[in-house]
Structure formats: structure tokens, C-alpha cells
Image (cartoon, rainbow, N blue to C red):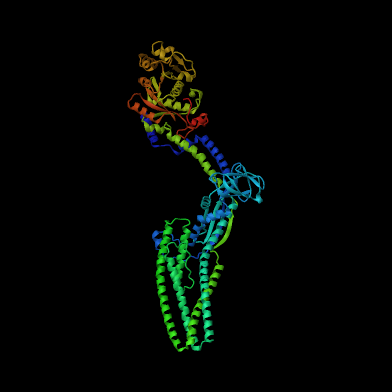
């Protein structure tokens, strides 16, 4: 069996496997102290962050909207736009409640554009009803809204404003403009505090963003109003005042139309009263001058018929006049803010119904325009509805007018017939009938208008809002913000997430070899051994701690040597790596000591003439060595030294560092030395320089039976494994194998990991914060 057979299956298996879940978990667990530090810092920050937050309270109120809206006749436009029609009273009332106009009025009445606060140790304390003195801006300056102004009452007549003494109760000129300070007798205090002036529109925008209006259930006419505020009383005052102003605005809209009708009736009654008075005098004067006291039975009957027709003709004239007013109203393009014409006296229900629908649409358009522009799809849709309804109403008016004119002609014809019968009546009675006829028409119309005025005034007196308050504004006892648990969870996540991210990026940018599969993917050179990391400063761990895991791994490597070069005879082993610090000296020393412990005679040559480490590692004093022998100055037996810690283990140190190591190694003496040592020693271990920097190791490769290339965990770069592949393809080194060295088994779980307690050791933890950036430890 050769080494390719021995490691081929294992290599394939390792090549297919990436880092497993356990390995990933251990990769992060090795930085547990960073997670602990970060978590502690962020939780402390989170604690103080929660403390400095101003609590926000939720205030709620409920109102009932009485839905008196009428069903719209034309829904085609909305169906084509695939949007919800704006005919729902509740939807429009929600827009009105959150309209800037209504909210700004509320802000002004409550003076919420001016806020007060006092400085606290962690956060500011907001003052509302307990403010010592309220300040009114009469004339702002260019600095009024840019800074917060300090205020402190000195006494009942003076205060310090922005550090200057000013009088109370009267307008004063300050850097904030002309202001007036009014002391609050109920909460007088000399504590210093600050006042912040804001523009009404800006404050209204903030309150609109914090205020929600929605039905309590789908299809319900009960609206739930909510707002958030740092001061519960201020939130309650805002909602209550908002509802009050909304009810007032709603009632005013209805009152406006009724008042218009009353004014129209009153004006007409005044005119008729004058005309009726004149007609009464005419009748009275005619009777006196002609000595007539009463009409005959025949004349009275004719008069009754004529009066009845005249009354109906007068009513038709009134209706025709109303129709003309409606047509004038329809002809206007800017009738959103125009009062609709009076319908008093119009008996045609179709026209009155359509006018009411048109008025409803115009009111909805007016309300929507307070929150959305003319180009909004809802406004465009309502405009289409208005245009369609106007066209329908125009057609209806033409039909109604035609019917009224027909009735009027019929009535006039009947009156003409009755007038013809007057020829048989005596001339004086006929003249009296003419006078009384005019009086009767005026009197009937006058009585009709008086009745309608009473009805309209009763309607005005009983005018109430379509809104009823179900629950006045109230605030819950506990703040809704900040949500402490959520904030702590956020800071907890940050405390874990930031070190996790740093470790993730660090691991992603780490181009070093961290697992055996990294080696197997890059080269076919077999991994003959895997040696764990050790922080032990003793260079001969196998001697000082024979039951340690490293000692067991070295013995496993020693056993594998028989598979690499089977058969008897001396064997030369070459140890090299890509760079210095990958553990050549440590592995060669411990493998040599392990071989010597079996009774084999072993010698190690310190042939890294440029940067030798063996002697300093063992703590031996420096003498003459290989560099002196290789230039022919001394015999090799004079420089052989015994390693004191282990029997049968010998050392030839490097000696004086020469200026031309490569040339010396290429001389005849090295070959003679290896030949002589093969006669005397069972194993010759050659501690060679790194191959990534100089060519010394390649010169020494001709004398080696086995070459061990050291790859150090989390130290050797992955691209340097390509160098091993290249050297193996060119057959520069004989019988090349890789030793995966200094594996930190506490970092992640390898499948081969041993039980430390079995060998008399305990698992190691991290040895300091510096290992986060660079691992240390001698190999």
C-alpha cells in the first residue's frame, strides 16, 4: 500500500464537504468574549436610551356619524376607474376630520403652536397646564421659530426672557419679536424653563401624522379617533376640541342653506306686504266711492273660480322662477362655494331630489379639496359625476317647465271663460271683482310665504349636527411608547449582530487555510498528519507531556512513516514550508524525539542557515556548526551535540550565519555529511528553510527520502497551497506529504477531535483578545 492509496478516499470525502453547521457555530463561539462585551455595551446603551425617551400616551374618542347621504345615480366613472366611489359619508367625514384647515383651527384655539419644557437630568419635562406663564407672539421676528427661548419668572410682575428682564401682562419687544407674557396664577413658579414657538401649519402637520380616524368595524358609522401625545391632558384637549370644531363646521354648513332660504322668504314677504297693502286700499276705496258693501251670489261664485285659478297661476309663476334660478346655478362653473338656490314652492320632487344630490356632490368635493389637489382621481371622478348630474337635471327642468307652461295656459283659458261670464254682472260689481282679484292673488301668495317662513324657521331652530359623541377623549394609564421590550430586543440584536457581522466579514476576508478540505481542494498531495495547536512553551512536548494529544498525534505521524518508505535502512526526512513560522522546527524536534524514544538513533540538522531556530528553541548555547563544516574547517563529529531531554537524539546546529548559504549547500561537504550520517543514524531529520522565499530547500531535496510540507492552520494562505501543487507536478521534492499543523481545535469541531481528558489535559479556551486579530503560539 502506498500513500496515495492510503489517503485517496479520505481526500475525496473531504473535498466534497464544506464547513458544517457545528464548525460554523464553533467559528463564532471562539469569539464569545467579543459577543459578551458588545452585548453588555449595547444593553447599557439601550437602558439609558429607554430612560431618555419621552413617553407617548394614546388618547381615544368615539363619535357617531348619522349617514344622511343619498344614493348617487351615476357610478359609471368610478367603475371605469376601478376605485371606491366617494359617496360614502363616513369616508368623507374621515378626510374632513384630518383636514389641515380643521386641525389648524384647533391648534390655534388651544395655542398648541407654543410648547414649554423644563430641563431634566436625562430628558426634558414637558409643561402644559402647569406652565408658570404662557407667552403669546404678537409680532414674530426672524429668530422667533429658530431657537428655544429661556424663561424664568422673577415675581408676579417681572420675568427673565432670554436673560433680559421684561414686564408681565403687556406687549414687550424681545429678540423673539413682540411678545406678551401672561402669568398662570394656579401654577406660579420661579423655576427656569424654555418656550418653543412653531408655525401653526408645521404643528398641524405633526398632529395630523399622529392622529388616526377609522371606523370601529367594517361598514360601521362609528369612528374611532386616536392620537399620540407626551402629555395625556394635551391629547385629550386636542381630540375634544377637534370634535367640537368638526360638529360646529358641520352644523354651519346646514345652517348656511337654511338661512339663505329664510332671507329669500323675508325679502319676498316685504315686497308683497307693500303690494298687498296697496291692493287692500284699492278695494276699500272702490267700495266706499261706489257705495258697494258686498257682491251678489252670482258674482261671488265667479270670483271664487277666478281667484282659485289666479292662485294656481301665481304658484306656477313661482315654480318657473325657481327653475330659472336653478338653471343659473347650473350654468356657473365655480359653484362649489355658492349657496344652492332655494327650493321653497317647487312641487316637482324629481327636480328637488336631483338638486339635493348635486348639492351633496358639491359639498363632498369642497371637503376633499381641503386635503387633495384638483388633479386627484377622486376629484376628477366627482367632477364627472357633477357634469353628468347637471346634464340630467337640465333635461328634467325642460320637461317640468313644459308641463308647468301647459298647466298655466289651461288655467288662463279657464280664467278667460269665467271673465266672459262677468259680462252678465252689473258693471260696478264687475269692476269690484277686478280690484278684489288682484288683492286675492297678493293675499294668497303672502299667506303662502308666511307659512313657509314659519316652517323654515322651525327647521333652522331644530337644526342639529349629524354627529353624536359616543365617548369623549380619554387616555390609557400606560404609555404606548417607548415599548421597552422591543427596544431592549433591538439593542440585544445589535449587541449580537455587530460582532457577528465583524466576525463574518473577518472570516470572509480570511484567505488562510482553516480546514483540511481547503488543502484537499487545492492539491493532490496527501495530508499525512494533523497536529493540534498548543500554547505549551516546552519545545519537546512529546517528552514533557507524553500523554497529551499532540504527543499522540506525533506518534501517529511516526507510525505512518513505515507506509511512506517501507523497508529497513536509514531514512532522511526533509521539513519545509512556504514561509517562516509554520512549525518546522517544532514538528521536526518532536518527531525526532518520538523516533528516538523507540530506540532508533536520530539526528536533526539545522540547515536553515539564514534564520536558524532549533538551538534557541531548545535553549542551548551557540557553538560552531554546519556552516563551519561545509567550508571544510572542522570534522562533522566535532559539531554533533546530544539533545539532553531525549536519549538517542542528536543535533547539529547551523553555526555561524554565512553570507552565501545557497552556494555552501551546493558544495561537496553536504553530500559527504549525509552519506556519513546514513551509516551511523537510523533517521536524519533536515530542518530546511521555507521554499517560498529561497531555493535552499530545493537544493536539500536531493538528499531526502520523504519531504514534509508544513501548512499551519489560520496562518498559511490558500494560494500558497498552489506552490505545493506546482512542486509536486515538477517532482522537485521526493515523496512529498503535507502536515496540517497548529489546528485550533477549540475553534470548531473536527471529526477527528480527541477527548482531552483521556490524555490528561483539559480543553483550552481563548488566551486573550489579541487572538481575535492574530494567533500566537510556538510550533
Which of the pair 437/45 is nearer the observer?
437
Residue 496 at what x, y percent from top left? Answer: 51, 39
Count of labels in the image: 0
Residue depicted at x 54% and y 36%: 37
Left or right: 528 with respect to 187? left
Residue found at the far top of this picture:
633
Image: 239 above or below 39 = below
Which of the pair 482/682 is nearer the observer?
482
| Residue 730, image quadrant | top left
Image: 540 above or below 157 = above
Residue 555 appearing in the image: yes
Residue found at the far left of this picture:
730
Left or right: 426 with respect to 193? left
Residue 92 at what x, y percent from top left? Answer: 48, 60
Residue 530 at what x, y percent from top left? Answer: 43, 29
Residue found at the far right of this picture:
155
Amino acid at each position: 500500500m502506498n500513500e496515495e492509496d492510503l489517503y485517496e478516499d479520505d481526500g475525496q470525502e473531504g473535498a466534497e464537504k464544506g464547513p458544517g453547521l457545528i464548525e460554523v457555530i464553533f467559528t463564532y463561539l471562539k469569539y464569545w468574549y467579543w459577543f459578551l462585551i458588545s452585548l453588555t455595551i449595547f444593553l447599557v446603551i439601550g437602558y439609558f436610551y429607554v430612560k431618555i425617551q419621552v413617553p407617548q400616551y394614546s388618547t381615544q374618542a368615539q363619535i357617531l356619524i348619522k349617514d344622511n347621504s343619498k344614493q348617487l345615480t351615476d357610478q359609471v366613472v368610478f367603475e371605469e376607474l376601478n376605485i371606491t366611489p366617494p359617496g360614502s359619508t363616513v369616508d368623507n367625514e374621515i378626510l374632513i376630520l384630518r383636514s389641515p384647515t380643521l386641525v389648524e383651527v384647533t391648534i390655534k384655539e388651544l395655542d398648541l403652536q407654543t410648547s414649554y419644557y423644563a430641563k431634566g437630568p436625562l430628558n426634558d419635562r414637558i409643561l402644559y397646564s402647569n406652565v408658570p406663564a404662557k407667552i403669546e407672539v404678537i409680532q414674530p421676528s426672524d429668530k422667533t421659530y429658530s431657537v428655544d427661548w429661556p424663561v424664568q419668572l422673577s415675581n408676579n410682575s417681572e420675568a427673565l426672557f432670554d436673560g433680559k428682564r421684561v414686564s408681565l401682562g403687556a406687549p414687550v419687544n424681545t429678540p423673539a419679536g413682540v411678545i406678551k407674557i401672561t402669568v398662570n396664577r394656579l401654577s406660579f413658579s420661579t423655576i427656569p424653563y424654555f418656550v418653543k414657538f412653531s408655525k401653526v401649519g408645521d404643528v398641524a402637520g405633526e398632529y395630523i401624522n399622529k392622529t388616526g380616524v377609522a371606523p370601529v368595524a367594517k361598514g360601521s358609522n362609528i369612528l374611532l379617533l386616536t392620537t399620540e401625545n407626551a402629555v395625556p391632558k394635551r391629547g385629550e384637549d386636542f381630540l375634544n376640541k377637534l370634535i367640537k370644531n368638526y360638529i360646529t363646521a358641520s352644523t354651519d354648513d346646514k345652517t348656511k342653506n337654511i338661512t339663505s332660504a329664510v332671507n329669500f322668504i323675508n325679502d319676498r314677504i316685504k315686497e308683497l306686504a307693500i303690494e298687498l297693502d296697496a291692493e287692500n286700499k284699492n278695494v276699500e276705496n272702490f267700495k266706499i266711492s261706489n257705495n258697494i258693501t258686498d257682491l251678489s251670489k252670482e258674482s261671488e261664485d265667479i270670483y271664487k273660480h277666478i281667484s282659485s285659478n289666479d292662485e294656481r297661476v301665481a304658484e306656477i309663476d313661482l315654480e318657473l322662477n325657481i327653475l330659472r334660478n336653478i338653471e343659473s346655478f347650473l350654468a356657473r362653473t365655480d359653484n362649489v362655494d355658492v349657496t344652492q338656490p332655494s327650493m321653497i314652492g317647487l312641487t316637482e320632487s324629481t327636480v328637488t331630489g336631483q338638486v339635493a344630490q348635486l348639492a351633496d356632490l358639491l359639498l363632498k368635493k369642497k371637503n376633499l379639496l381641503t386635503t387633495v389637489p384638483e388633479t386627484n382621481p377622486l376629484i376628477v371622478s366627482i367632477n364627472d359625476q357633477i357634469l353628468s348630474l347637471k346634464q340630467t337635471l337640465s333635461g328634467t327642468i325642460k320637461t317640468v317647465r313644459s308641463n308647468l307652461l301647459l298647466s298655466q295656459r289651461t288655467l288662463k283659458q279657464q280664467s278667460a271663460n269665467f271673465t266672459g261670464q262677468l259680462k252678465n254682472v252689473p258693471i260696478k260689481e264687475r269692476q269690484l271683482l277686478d280690484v278684489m282679484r288682484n288683492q286675492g292673488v297678493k293675499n294668497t301668495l303672502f299667506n303662502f310665504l308666511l307659512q313657509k317662513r314659519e316652517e323654515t324657521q322651525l327647521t333652522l331652530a331644530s337644526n342639529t349636527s349629524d354627529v353624536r359623541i359616543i365617548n369623549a377623549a380619554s387616555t390609557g394609564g400606560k404609555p404606548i411608547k417607548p415599548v421597552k421590550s422591543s427596544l431592549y430586543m433591538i439593542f440585544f440584536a445589535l449587541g449580537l449582530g455587530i460582532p457577528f457581522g465583524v466576525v463574518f466579514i473577518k472570516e470572509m476576508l480570511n484567505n488562510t487555510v482553516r480546514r483540511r478540505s481547503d488543502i484537499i481542494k487545492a492539491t493532490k498531495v496527501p495530508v499525512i498528519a494533523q497536529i493540534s495547536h498548543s500554547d505549551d512553551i516546552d519545545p519537546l512536548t512529546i517528552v514533557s507531556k507524553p500523554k497529551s494529544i499532540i504527543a499522540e498525534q506525533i506518534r501517529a505521524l511516526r507510525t505512518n512513516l513505515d507506509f511512506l518508505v517501507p523497508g529497513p535502512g536509514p531514512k532522511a526526512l526533509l521539513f519545509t514550508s512556504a514561509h517562516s513560522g509554520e512549525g518546522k522546527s517544532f514538528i521536526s524536534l518532536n518527531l525526532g524525539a518520538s523516533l528516538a524514544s523507540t530506540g532508533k538513533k536520530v539526528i536533526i540538522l539545522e540547515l536553515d542557515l539564514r534564520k536558524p531556530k532549533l538551538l534557541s528553541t531548545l535553549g542551548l548555547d551557540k557553538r560552531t556548526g554546519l556552516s563551519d563544516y561545509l567550508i571544510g574547517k572542522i570534522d562533522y563529529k566535532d559539531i554533533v551535540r546530544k539533545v539532553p531531554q531525549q536519549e538517542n537524539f542528536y543535533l547539529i546546529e547551523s553555526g555561524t550565519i554565512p553570507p552565501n548559504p545557497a552556494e555552501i549547500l551546493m558544495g561537496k561537504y553536504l553530500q559527504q555529511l549525509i552519506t556519513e550520517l546514513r551509516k551511523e543514524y537510523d533517521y536524519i531529520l533536515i530542518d530546511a528553510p521555507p521554499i517560498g522565499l529561497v531555493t535552499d530547500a530545493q537544493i536539500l531535496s536531493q538528499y531526502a527520502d520523504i519531504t514534509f510540507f508544513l501548512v499551519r492552520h489560520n496562518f498559511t494562505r490558500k494560494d500558497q497551497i498552489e506552490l505545493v501543487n506546482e512542486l509536486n507536478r515538477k517532482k522537485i521534492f521526493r515523496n512529498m506529504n503535507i502536515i496540517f499543523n497548529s489546528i485550533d481545535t477549540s475553534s470548531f469541531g473536527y471529526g477527528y477531535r480527541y477527548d482531552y481528558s483521556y490524555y490528561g489535559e483539559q480543553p483550552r479556551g481563548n488566551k486573550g483578545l489579541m487572538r481575535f486579530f492574530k494567533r500566537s503560539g510556538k510550533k
